[in-house]
Image (tube, grey):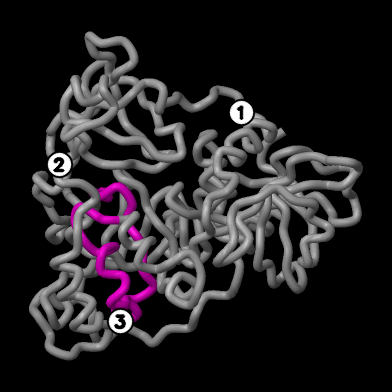
Amino acid sequence: MSSPRMVLVALATAVASLAPVAGAPGAPAASATAAASAAGATSAASATRAARPCAGARTCYVDVSVAEIWTAPDQVRTVDARALTHPVDIRGWLADLGRDGPLRHDVPGETQALYGTRVTVERTWRDARGLLWDHVLVDGQPSPKDTTGRGAYPGWVPDRQLTSARAAAPSGATPKRIAAPTAWAYTTLAAAVAAAGAGRATEYSYGTAFSVRPTEVPGVERATAHDGTALYLRSADLTEVRPHPTGADAVTEARRFLGLDYLWSGASAFGYDCSGLTSQVYAMLGVTVPRDTQPQFDAGAGRAPAGSATGTRIAKEDLAALRPGDVLAFGQDEDHVTHAGLYTGTKDGRPMMINSPRTGERVREEPFLSSGRTYLGATRFLP
């Protein structure tokens, strides 16, 4: 991300209890929890699917299109209510935050996790209004903040956005991911063919993984939701992971998001922060890199966290050695990296990058030596 994370008070006295605890440390404000219960859903069709919470299981899965992973429950604000529901109303939440200003700038989140992402539940805690929270480790987002060695990212999520049940992939299914910035899943084949109407179920982000089988209608594929219901997706929105990706492929993927608004903690195509964009582009290519800017840079010097690909350091003086797809680092010095971008090549002799700059701005491609940031070097994860 593009700035140091906030320092938070400990929650040790508030965790590991499943009974309501009035006024316990770590509880969201009463207004936030009450509003969350009444917040709108992504769509009426998806609202008919009942949540099956994690309910004490150790291994669970994200059961909403995008789950915000919060720093601490007591940091959640009233304006965040739509991000706490099942199904989540991610677009409604972003509208409530606005495009710029303190509400969007100060999102108290760590990262996000896409539908189907596996999480390990470390402990649970119920707030004063009855909302159950899980402290989890999010798979696929390596971070040195995870001290267990799992190669995951720690944070808090409402239990109702998780499920302990996961439908098995049908025999003969093909693993694919959403390749469009976002894509709708439909409850019926006819609705998927029409790509409209009451059969729209849920809008999923780029990178969301499904196991799919073809249907009798060309251009439509069938997946199975966690609760066993059928989901129909358009083939044009899906792709298989490339067998031999290159850095140039990372650039192609990143260009899909030019013009997308920045979101602190964003790791979905509803809004990325700087390292959310770089890490998720690489995830789409089947390469797991660290979630945040500092460890992305450190991975080029042999200090990758558990679960991450290692990289090659490109010295800041060696601009000629840069290749498309290299992850650029910016900041005060090599131990204080605060921003990341993706090298795209040169234009009119100037080295360029794609980056998600800051709150109130959009993903753009620009000359990085004149971006107003101090360039520190780069990490190469792909040839």
263 lies left or right of 341? left
Residue 145, percent from left and from top: 48, 67
- Is the residue marked by circle 1 packed among few (<14), some (14-19), or many (20+) residues within 10 Å? some
- Is the residue marked by circle 2 packed among few (<14), some (14-19), or many (20+) residues within 10 Å? some
Residue 339, percent from left and from top: 66, 63
Residue at the spot of label 2: 45
Secondary structure of the residue carrying numbered label 1: loop
Q: Is residue 5 above or below residue 8?
A: above
From the image, state whether disc 1 or disc 3 is nearer to you: 3
Residues drawn in magenta: 61-89
The answer to which of marks 2 and 1 sits earlier in the sequence is 2
Secondary structure of the residue carrying numbered label 2: helix
Q: Residue at x 68, y 57 (%)?
A: 297
Residue at the spot of label 1: 245
Q: Residue at x 55, y 44 (%)?
A: 257
Residue 98 is labelled as none
From the image, state whether disc 2 or disc 1 is nearer to you: 2
The answer to which of marks 3 and 2 sits earlier in the sequence is 2
Q: Residue at x 39, y 68 (%)?
A: 97
Question: Does the residue at mark 3 contact the one at mark 2 (Cβ under 8 Å)?
Answer: no
Q: Is residue 259 visible?
A: yes
Which quadrant does the C terminus fall into?
top right
Secondary structure of the residue carrying numbered label 3: helix
79 lies left or right of 230? right
The amino acid marked with disc number 2 is Ala
Question: Does the residue at mark 2 contact the one at mark 1 (Cβ under 8 Å)?
Answer: no
The amino acid marked with disc number 3 is Asp
